[in-house]
Image (cartoon, helix red, strand yellow):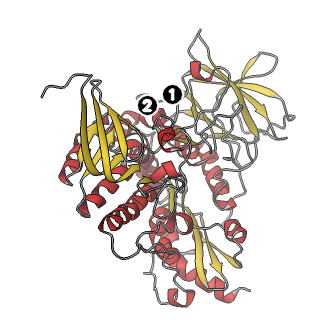
Amino acid sequence: MSRTPETVVEDAYDVVVLGAGPTGENLADRVRAAGLTVAVVESELVGGECSYWACMPSKALLRPMAARAAAGAVAGAREAVSGPLDADAVLARRDSFAAHWKDDGQVSWLDSVGAELIRGRGRLDGPRRVAVEGPDGGRRLLTARRAVAVCTGSRALLPELPGLAEARPWTSREATSAKEVPGRLAVVGGGVVGVEMAAAWRALGSEVTLLVRGDRLLPRMEPFVGEYVAEGLSRAGVEIRTGTSVTAVRRRPEDGMVSVTVTLTADNGRTEAPAARGGTGRGASSAGGGSDSTNAGPGSTGAGERAADGAERRTDGPANRTDRTGRRTDVVVDEVLFATGRAPRTDDLGLETVGLEPGSWLEVDDTCLVKGVPGEWLYAVGDANHRSLLTHQGKYQARIAGAAIGARARGGPALETGPWGAHAATADAAGAPQVVFTEPEVAAVGLTAEQARRRGLRVRVVDYDLGRVAGAALYADDYRGRARMVVDLDREVPVGVAFVGPGVGELLHAATVAVVGEVPLDRLWHAVPAYPTVSEVWLRLLETYRDEP
């Protein structure tokens, strides 16, 4: 039968998934494994944000920087490394990891697991119903016999600032897909996206200014982590300004440059690097990374700056500026990136048809079932539920939710929803791992010391200088880094681990196993690290715990 835009085609599936990013793909795979039929609705590229505008392209941009740094840190190898990165080659390699923004491979994978892909924009149309408007204007009405899963992810959150829309700012999408290296780049925000993109574009040749409202980088991690990252960025030539708030943005018509108006909110707009040592989805009226903040060093970017008297001047040089709070300056750059948070992609999803607020984060239980919706049929998985905005945690939730949907469809025994049960996403709150691919790298899992204390745990913090480990000394001359283990004293198990230093991302899974497995310290003594590897830091942490009061 031929279809016209007026034709409404009705179909029924066991499960309808809204969003074909990694979370939606994994959920579709799991419900198919449970013997259920599934349709996946996607309006953009199959593979989602991670594949094309986040994880993969961003790490492809960052890897050449890390490879060059690793070679330059070892005598005999550093002599073979000279000159800047080949920006064209880096961008071409990035394009290949983003599949040149084509989703043929991902579509083939979905087909291989038996999921039906439906192109178009899907919206809830009452309980268990999804209306899809196709790219040709045709409409389909899908009925879900068992479940609808919202896996629509999140989008970059832009503040409400004068001139911002007209200035055409970068978000994480533009920062990971840009075809040319901007001469001068301002990055607003000191969280993960902000520091990674500042590092990547500086390595490719941009003069980068990082503007942050607070007083340190990566504020949700251990404080020393932000200090090491700030020092690394400053050493690379990134200028980091703390205590700043962006109050206006204007793209100048005469030359296409962007003028970013910055107001100082602290006494010192630039802070020294530490000494070397062994959101709701609503906009804000100013920007500086929200809770993202930095403790930074005095690198120079050469970005232009316009003082209150209107005279434009260069800002080269390491001298500190001790401006008075409230003073305004204009930073003039080719592009400005706002990395100031994320908002849920739920504003045009038909949530009002099932009694929920459009544009809201969706509150769920540990099986990812949305609260406040009767009938146990609506799930929110991944970023949309705001539990943990990480791709790998979204995929983890998809495995948990897929198992729960399958179990509820089969009936029979009650679901295992207790901590670490087969149908409970416990790791979101207790063991979510994360790597920040700056130079130095950051790797962390579980709770910070502050978070553990806020939860009422009686803890002891154990720190160790990574540079004193034999494997680290072999890895890089003058290796600098730090390890921290947060121990629950009542159970004598690690509840959080953090590393900062070159290459520490590969240490993270052992830490994740220890935290998620709640491995007692007396058992960890029997996990012997190979010598001479950086993993020997585990033995040093245990020795420090044993020998120091």
360 vs 312, nearest the viewer: 360
Q: Position of residue 532 (x, y in %)?
A: 45, 78
Q: Residue drawn 51% across and 89% down?
A: 523
Amino acid of disc 2: Ala
Amino acid of disc 1: Pro
Callout 1: helix, strand or loop? loop
Residue identifier under label 1: 182
Q: Position of residue 535 (x, y in %)?
A: 48, 75
Specify the quadrant of the image occupied by residue 153.
top left
Question: Mark 2 or mark 1: which is in front?
Answer: 2
Specify the quadrant of the image occupied by residue 142.
top left
Callout 2: helix, strand or loop? loop
Q: Quadrant of the N terminus?
A: top left
Q: Residue drawn 53% across and 44% down?
A: 355
Q: Is residue 157 visible from the viewing direction of this image?
A: yes
Kindly identify which numbered label has been placed on residue 178: 2
